Image: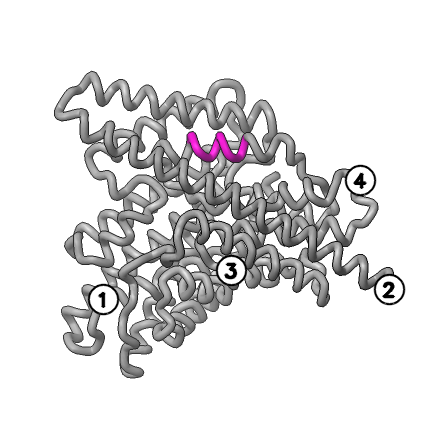
Amino acid sequence: MNQKHTGNMLLVKSGLVGILTGLVAALFHTVLDSADAWRQMLFHSIDGSILILLFLCVLTVAAVVFSLFLVKKIVPEASGSGIQQVEITLKEHKTIRWRRILPVKFLGGLLAIGSGMVLGREGPTIHMGSALGTMVGGEGHQDRFQHHVLVAAGAAAGLAAAFNAPLAGLIFVTEEMRDQFRYNFHSLMAVTLASTLSVVVVQFLNGQQSDIINASFQCPSLASLPLFVLLGVCFGVIGTLFNRLLISGVSFSKKQKGVRPYLFAALVAVGICLAGYFFPVVTGSGHNGLELALNHHFSTRAMLLIFVLRFFFSLCSYSIGTPGGIFAPMLALGTFFGLWYGQIVFMIFPGLVEHAGVFAIGGMGALFAATVQAPITGIVLIVEMTRSYELILPLMVTCLSASLVANRLGGRAIYSQLAELR
């Protein structure tokens, strides 16, 4: 009876974590969308004025530098996505300083991501979800298992709310955090409930549309599957390179002392501001550019150029250390390279596939699988985000080949490597 009561209380608390995470995530997404719209409006108002452009550069630098200041001076563990911090919390029974994490992650993420940095909103929502799990569980933590489950439930709810993908939130915890997550019936039910309720809240407040619209394509023929294998091989190489460069960038940033980290952040902020004015698709999380690309707004050459520039800005933006994730930027990178690849295939093998976008869908999941080393999460996440249920088979082929190639090249899960840099 006591065990049953404990299980029921755990479910109640997990449900509360899911609801709170959904509310915070919905608010976070709303203010980020407003910041992005405001930023685009300011860019359109420049009309050739150098003074206004300089003012926007100063504004961007101020926002990014202040975001970094909040992290360094108040709560250093709010740096980056925060997923590695959640994994450390689960593994080492540490606590999350939720009173500091929640405001710093929210405001710092808003300033950095809203300024156009190539960062994703999912990192802050996952970390804030785990912080809410700590808050709901209480600070005493006499029951370590309860604390552990509520932190994991908050992480699942955060990912689910970020991408409108409840099943991906559950799979993410059980796959990516498989070495830390304590798997049993009650923990699984708790994570599932939190993930589900967070999405219910987000959809109630922000609408029920899929995260990426206009991404529904017909399933390609079996004859095209070898081309998806080749695409996965490419992303296995790209993902391994991305991880190594990202770790080098973060390591470099951590070694900087005094005012140097802020100078580095200011330099990147200026670059982001200028790029946002002259070539806006290479800045931000990439969501808008991703949908434009899927609707044939860019040429084949432009697609490759966008990929290269976003690759560079993704590394720079994350290396600084401001709050922000890398999931969304990776999805955009996968889209642009996948579409470039698909357009080449379309020219060489006309009629083999109906739309080059099928390779973009495969690319989204493949880069995620190669970098995070969580292919099942990648597959489920992309299917839920795009509702491309007919593309599960080519998506699985691409993610599997990308993961295997990355593994053979010595690649490791990016968050495990980031955790070692703490």
Separation of marks 2 and 1 at Cα, in angstroms: 58 Å
Amino acid bearing label 3: Pro
Separation of marks 1 and 4 at Cα, in angstroms: 54 Å
Q: Which residue is mark 3?
A: 166
Amino acid bearing label 4: Gly
Q: Which residue is mark 1?
A: 356
- Indicate the secondary structure of the residue bearing disc 3: helix
Q: Earlier in the sequence, mark 3 or mark 2?
A: 2
- Left or right: where does residue 234 sit relative to residue 43? right
Amino acid bearing label 2: Met
Q: Nearer the viewer, mark 4 or mark 2?
A: 2
Amino acid bearing label 1: Ala
State the quadrant of the N terminus: bottom right
Q: Which of 152/410 is in front?
A: 152
- Indicate the secondary structure of the residue bearing disc 1: loop
Q: Is residue 321 visible?
A: no
Over which residues does the magenta segment extend?
A: 104-111
Seen as rendered, the residue at the extreme right is: 2
Q: Residue at x 57, y 41 (%)?
A: 128
Q: Earlier in the sequence, mark 4 or mark 3?
A: 4
- Indicate the secondary structure of the residue bearing disc 4: loop
User: CB atoms at circles 1 and 4 under 8 Å apart?
Assistant: no
Name above or below for residue 154 compared with residue 166. Answer: above
Q: Earlier in the sequence, mark 2 or mark 1?
A: 2
Q: Residues within 10 Å of mark 4 (few under 14, many from 20)?
A: few
Q: Nearer the viewer, mark 1 or mark 3?
A: 3
Q: Residue at x 60, y 55 (%)?
A: 194
Separation of marks 3 and 2 at Cα, in angstroms: 31 Å
| Residue 16 in picture, x, y percent from top left | 64, 49
Q: Which residue is mark 4?
A: 140
Q: Which residue is mark 2?
A: 1
